[in-house]
Each structure stands twice: as structure tokens, then as C-alpha cells.
Image: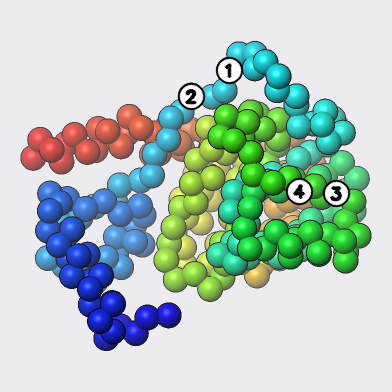
Amino acid sequence: MLSERSIIASYFRYFEAYSYKQAKKIGLMSEKNLEIFKQRHLQYPCEVLRNWASTQTVVGNHENYVSIRERLNLKNKVIYFYGGNIGHAQDMANLMRLAKRMQCYPDAHFLFIGQGDEVELINTLAVQWKLTNYSYLPSVGQSEFKLILTDVDVGLFSLSARHTAHNFPGKLLGYMVEALPILGSVNYGNDLQCIVNGNNAGYIHVNGEDDNLFSSAEMLYANEMLRREIGSNAKKLLVEQFSVSSAACQITKVLEE
């Protein structure tokens, strides 16, 4: 949208460099991002600093909250849940294709909650494909969102194949807090795939590998013990690499240098 040589780009590059100079060390969220940053900015000290989240699960009674399973009559369903931005960056048609193929399993249900410029698209596809295993709800508050996570079985996400960055969607941390197995798609080369798959915390495929995504969804549907095992690994990964305490320890070491 902006030419690299434009005045606006130069303006932002100036303040980008100014900001970097103020830092004792710059944190990048993954190894691939670190690699890209070093190629462009060799002069700045930098290292991998993961995103972080509290590891505390939702506990206790919550007055006035009615289970999403009761509200949507999903009592005995295996719920594949997507929560967050529903837009072009996510390529939501990717997940809708998965929901369409999973219609052969009567107890599989796809629940999407959020807002964005592809809400109309997913609802249109649901009607066009006559999906009976799909529900959409608009965005909810953070406290209710956390409670909904305790009611679902699999955490879904999708990144557009057109991405060139290697981001770690914040929604995954919420899934990991509640020990949900992760299922999703990323752009080619995204090292999130290695992090999650390598720690047996979920199944991540390159966007466009529809058959592989479907096979993984089938495995999670058929085996509750597998869902629990992979979900437990996701929580372990959160504690070891994405917790507030692990990030605090890393930042403290930098400050002490």
C-alpha cells in the first residue's frame, strides 16, 4: 500500500530506528522472526522472547453464566472452537472447508465467536453448504470468553497462506491455558508449526493441506484420550515457554547484564 521510497515510509522508518536505539535488547516472538530481523538490523542486540500469558485456569462457580453447551444444545458434541478476529488475515474459508468435510461425523460441531470482515463470508458459506454442524456468535467479553474455553474440546486457528511474517496468534495462549489441543493452519515456513507439532501440543499444517487438516480433525474427534494427552502437552508448553514467569526471568536477566 505504501512505496518503500515514499515520504510516509521514510517517516515511519525513522521512528522505527529511533525506538530500537532506546532498547537494551529487542525481543522477537520466534526464531524465524529473529532471523528476519537480524537480516535487516544487524546493529541491534536481539533475542527470542515468547509471547506470555497467565497459566491460571478458570476455577470456581460463576454466577449467571450458562454453559455454551446448554445454550446451543451441544451437550454431547465434540466442539471445535475458533475465537477471535474473523478476517482476511485468517482465511476463514479454510476452516469452513474443514467444517463441511466433518459433517460426516454427527457429534462434531464447529463454533466460531468473533467479529471481522469475513463474518458475512462464513455465514454465507454455512447457508450455501447447508452446514448443520456450525454455529456463529458475535464477540463476547473477556471473562465470558475464558469460561467458554472451559466448555470446548479443540482450539482452532488459521493464518492466511499469503502471510510473510511468522506470528503466534494470541488466541493459542488462551487455548493452552485450558489445556486444549491445537488444530490449525499456517503460512509456509512459519515456525509455529515446528513449536506446536514438535511438542505434541497439537496438529498444525500448511494452509492448503486440506486433507492433512481433515485427518487431524478426525483423529481428535475419535479419541478423547488423545485430546486429553495433546491438551496436557499444550499446557506444559505454555508453562515452559509462554508463561509470565518464564518471560519475567528472561527479561530480568537482560536487565542484570
Give the Cα separation between the discs numbered 3 and 2: 31 Å
Query: Which label is found at residue 192?
Result: none
Give the Cα separation between the discs numbered 3 and 1: 29 Å
Q: Earlier in the sequence, mark 4 or mark 1?
A: 1
Q: Say whether residue 224 is left or right of residue 26.
A: right
Number of other residues with Cα within 10 Å of mark 1, as a class: few under 14, some 14 to 19, many 20 or more: few
Residue 90 point in image, percent of width and height:
59, 61
Instruction: Please name the residue that numbered disc 2 is placed on.
Output: 56
Residue 203 point in image, percent of width and height:
61, 51
Nearer the camera: disc 2 or disc 4 = 4
Instruction: Please name the residue that numbered disc 3 is placed on.
Output: 133
Instruction: Please name the residue that numbered disc 1 is placed on.
Output: 59
Q: Is residue 79 visible?
A: yes
Label 2–label 4 contact, CB within 8 A: no
Q: The disc labelled 2 sits on which kind of residue? A: Gln
Q: Please state, as top left, top right, bottom left or bottom right, where the N terminus lies in the image.
A: bottom left
Residue 67 point in image, percent of width and height:
75, 26
Instruction: Please name the residue that numbered disc 4 is placed on.
Output: 136
